């Protein structure tokens, strides 16, 4: 199976996650909706934007705004897109996300999962979701050349 | 929504709070070892007491399964009754005869502390064992006993087995019939997931008290909290709901007294007001402060949205146990992720949907990045 078109992505969102709104305008797919990752989580308004020529969806939490837990302003596992900072839910080198995959089955649930760990981190100061850290404030175009230590690849590794 | 395994209530988190506040295996085993050693010592034919029929049994939290781990200046203990069939004995004579026997114990004899109504063994690691000498109450019969008050030199009525029975009834469990033998074992310490809602509720209330007062003398007694929990408990199986009901009922009861003496009768010994110790103003003020705070926290906890907010409340109420509960919640999700078993639970099924949507497996992913936000 080759790259999914924006129209195909939209169809999959409507089939698998009908509670989310999906639209395509000027070559950009926008998936917007309310997420509640766990039964006692807050409700978050989240927007996913995707352009085929960029190849990677951007995730933005519109409300409530993401915040750091102390005065240092640090949030684990986010990407600084310049205009905003959003959850960074996959590592490109692992082929977890490719343009052949469905946003509805990957980016959407990964974002819910990120929000679950985010709330735990906001409370306890420990990131329980594992992942790979990188130098902070790198921009999207630098991700392809970023290297990461293998030792951090296991689930459950704590950060933050 | 992710299938986190968590319910919309905070029941599971509260149950996880209890796990690290229970006695460690070593602490439990130490308590049982001292109990067994003392009962053998008291029953030994070399003992001057051996000519009497003696029944030894645990009482209080050790018998109810509501003991909690020591915190700060608070110790843990095991209380046991040494019931001696000795008609016509005076309170002081009974106390002295048990005291003398224990003082002769080669290992524990030097650890004896004489208390008003019990003989205490002060052991290491914040543990003490209280042995309560007693005779059967000839007037009230049944499980009623008379305990010597060393200072006042008279008998005080009590009914520990009756209390255990009342507690077990409130738990909706059936008290096991006491076998015809001369001692009753300390019950095993059950894991939190196997305990009754009432037992968990009592443990949470006691831990909240210990975090609130850090062992200060004005803190309300465990038996007062346990009895008020028993009397407010209506059999609800949700721990979160039970906690809220209890905290609000306790506040109503204490505040309704409006400065008048608070009366909390011992259900197994009706003449005994367990709140009598609150006649001093500092103790009464302390209880009022605790119940107001506890009720407010329980209400907030029942309504809080966001696991960070829930954690903040649990941390205030139960200190570091809250971190353990949150880690357990994350561990459950991580275990499913690691085995590719984590799924998305479909949103509320539409009534017009031809068939319900199945839950979807979430593929593995790796969170990346990290940034400072300004």
Image (cartoon, coloured by chain):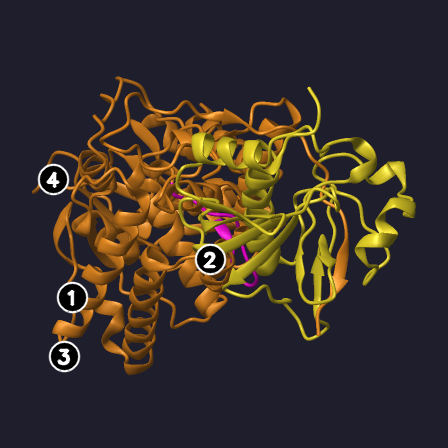
Q: Earlier in the sequence, mark 1 or mark 4?
A: 4
Give the residue pinned by disc 2. B314
Q: Is residue B348 above or below residue B354?
A: below
Whichever of callouts 3 and 4 sits on the residue coming sooner in the sequence is 4
Chain that is yellow in the image: A
**Mark 4 — on which chain does it sit?**
B
Q: Nearer the viewer, residue A2 or B80?
A: A2
Of callouts 3 and 1, the N-terminal one: 1
| Gap between marks 3 and 1 measured at Cα | 9 Å
Mark 2 or mark 3: which is in front?
Answer: 2
Q: Residue furthest left?
A: B139
Closest to the observer: B173 or A69? A69
Q: Which chain is disc 2 placed on? A: B
Determine which of the numbered discs, if any, sits on residue B350 in the image: none
Q: Which chain is orange?
A: B
Q: Nearer the viewer, mark 1 or mark 4?
A: 1
Q: Tell me the element at label 1.
A: helix
Neighbor class of circle 3 (other Cα within 10 Å; few <14, some 14-19, many 20+) is few
Give the numbered dot on residue B258: 3
Image quadrant containing the N terminus of chain A: top right
């Amino acid at each position: 199976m080759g790259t999914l078109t924006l129209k195909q992505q939209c169809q999959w969102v409507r089939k698998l996650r009908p509670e989310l709104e999906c639209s395509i305008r000027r070559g950009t797919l926008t998936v917007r909706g309310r997420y509640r990752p766990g039964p006692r989580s807050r409700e978050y308004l989240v927007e996913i934007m995707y352009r085929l020529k960029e190849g990677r969806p951007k995730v933005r939490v519109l409300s409530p705004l993401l915040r750091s837990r102390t005065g240092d302003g640090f949030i684990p596992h986010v990407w600084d897109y310049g205009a905003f900072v959003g959850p960074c839910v996959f590592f490109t080198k692992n082929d977890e996300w490719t343009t052949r995959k469905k946003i509805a089955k990957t980016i959407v649930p990964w974002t819910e999962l990120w929000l679950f760990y985010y709330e735990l981190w906001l409370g306890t100061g420990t990131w329980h979701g594992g992942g790979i850290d990188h130098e902070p404030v790198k921009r999207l175009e630098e991700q392809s050349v970023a290297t990461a230590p293998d030792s951090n690849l296991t689930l459950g590794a704590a950060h933050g | 929504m992710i299938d986190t395994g968590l319910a919309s209530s905070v029941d599971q988190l509260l149950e996880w709070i209890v796990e690290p506040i229970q006695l460690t295996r070593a602490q439990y085993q130490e308590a049982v070892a001292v109990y067994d050693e003392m009962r053998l010592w008291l029953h030994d034919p070399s003992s001057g007491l051996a000519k009497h029929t003696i029944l030894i049994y645990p009482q209080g939290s050790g018998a109810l399964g509501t003991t909690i781990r020591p915190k700060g200046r608070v110790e843990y203990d095991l209380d046991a009754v040494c019931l001696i069939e000795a008609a016509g004995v005076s309170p002081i004579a009974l106390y002295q005869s048990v005291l003398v026997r224990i003082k002769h114990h080669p290992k524990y004899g030097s650890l004896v502390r004489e208390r008003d109504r019990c003989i205490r063994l002060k052991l290491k690691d914040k543990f003490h064992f209280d042995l309560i000498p007693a005779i059967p109450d000839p007037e009230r019969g049944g499980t009623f006993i008379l305990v010597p008050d060393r200072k006042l030199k008279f008998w005080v009525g009590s009914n520990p087995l009756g209390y255990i029975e009342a507690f077990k009834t409130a738990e909706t469990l059936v008290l096991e019939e006491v076998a015809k033998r001369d001692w009753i074992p300390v019950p095993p310490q059950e894991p939190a997931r196997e305990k009754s809602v009432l037992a968990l509720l009592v443990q949470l209330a006691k831990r909240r008290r210990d975090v609130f007062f850090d062992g200060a003398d004005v803190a309300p007694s465990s038996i007062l909290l346990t009895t008020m929990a028993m009397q407010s408990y209506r059999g609800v199986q949700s721990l979160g709901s039970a906690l809220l009901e209890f905290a609000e009922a306790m506040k109503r009861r204490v505040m309704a007294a409006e400065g008048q003496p608070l009366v909390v009768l011992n259900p197994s010994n009706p003449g005994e007001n367990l709140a009598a110790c609150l006649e001093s103003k500092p103790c009464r003020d302390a209880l009022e402060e605790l119940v107001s705070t506890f009720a407010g926290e329980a209400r907030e906890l029942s309504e809080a949205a966001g696991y960070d907010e829930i954690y903040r409340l649990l941390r205030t109420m139960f200190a570091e146990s809250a971190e353990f509960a949150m880690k357990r919640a994350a561990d459950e999700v991580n275990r499913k992720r690691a085995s590719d078993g984590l799924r998305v639970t479909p949103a509320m099924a539409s009534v017009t949907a031809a068939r319900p949507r199945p839950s979807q497996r979430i593929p593995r992913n790796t969170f990346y990045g990290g940034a400072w936000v300004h």
